[in-house]
Amino acid sequence: MAGGRLRPQGWRHHRRCRQGRGHEIAPRTGRPPQPGLSVRRRRQIIEAAYEVFTAHGYAATAISAVAARAGVGQGTIYRYFGSKREILDHVVDFGIDKVIESVRIPELFGTARSLDELMDAVRAAVSRIYDLLEREPQVLRLLLVEAGAIDPELAQRLLGLEAVTASLVAGEISRGVYAGWLRADLDPEVLGHAILTLVGPWLMRELHGTPDPRARERSTEGVLRLLEKALRIREAVS
């Protein structure tokens, strides 16, 4: 590729043949290649698609709207992506990255040395989730409501994400059990999925209803107290 245009497959061979017959070909002029342009252009399109998908919905958004938002022609869109559905896969990845960055998920795992520290980390994560809901509710609406309803493949992919997250939670519970600061009779795998099941209704209520800070605080603290009691080592009865 030179100057942003695709060459015919036989171009290099044709050029060598002409040089072999003694013809001189002047070097081509034009815009030089820009290192990293392809990566930047893809990112530009994905960010534009994220904005229009979350604003208007995936089904209601045409490729022309993505192109207009990105400031490129529709032909440029199809140079980098084969279809709107392919763009959606990348938009979902973009949304997941936003959640991970906002909630700072890596801070939840491998750092707690006691149940109290673990619960502090969980409270901080819940607070950051609600902050994200207030700043960008559209990202969670896209991931939790719209994307899973588009087709079975994407629904399975999001279920796989839930399974991975539950596995991380289970690993942290196993670490606490092994270290002796969580109950030894816990089933980490079952509890990992159960914790995510407790979180889901909060998010859906926030997405579909009118946020109520006091109700949010009551429900959050109630569930966290329940979780803490389930995890805490029981005192021996004398």
Image (tube, helix red, strand yellow):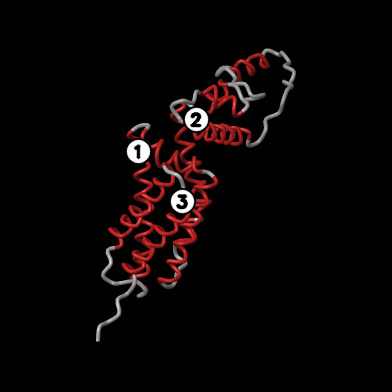
Mark 3, residue position: 212
Q: Is residue 156 above or below residue 232?
A: above
- Which amino acid type is shown beneath numbered disc 3? Asp
View extreme (bottom): residue: 238
Residue 218 image-quadrant placement:
bottom left
Residues tagged 3 and 2 counted as in contact (Cβ below 8 A): no
- Residue 39 at x, y percent in the picture: 58, 36
Q: What is the distance, in whole Å, between disc 3 and disc 1 at their CAs?
A: 29 Å
In this rendering, which labeled residue sits more in front, label 1 or label 2? 2
Q: Amino acid at mark 2?
A: His
Which of pointers 3 and 1 lies earlier in the amino acid sequence? 1
Under mark 1, the amino acid is: Ala
Label 3: few (<14), some (14–19) or many (≥20) C-alpha neighbours in 10 Å: few
> Which secondary structure lies at badge 3?
loop
Q: Position of residue 104 (x, y in %)?
A: 51, 55
CA separation in Å, label 3 and label 2: 25 Å
**124 relative to 201 in the view: left or right:** right
Of residue 119 and residue 27, the one placed in the foreground of this image is 119
Label 1 neighbour load within 10 Å: few <14, some 14-19, many 20+:
some
Question: How many discs appear?
Answer: 3
- Mark 2, residue position: 56
Secondary structure under badge 1?
helix
Name the residue beneath numbered marker 1: 155
Helix, strand or loop status at disc 2: helix
Q: Which sits earlier in the primary sequence, circle 3 or circle 2?
A: 2
Residues 101 and 145: in front is 145
Give the class, few, some or many, for how many residues have Cα within 10 Å of label 2's Cα (few <14, many ≥20): few
Q: Nearer the viewer, mark 3 or mark 1?
A: 3
- Look at the picture and state if 55 lies above or below 166: above
Residue 16, numbered circle? none
Q: Residue at x 46, y 39 (%)?
A: 92
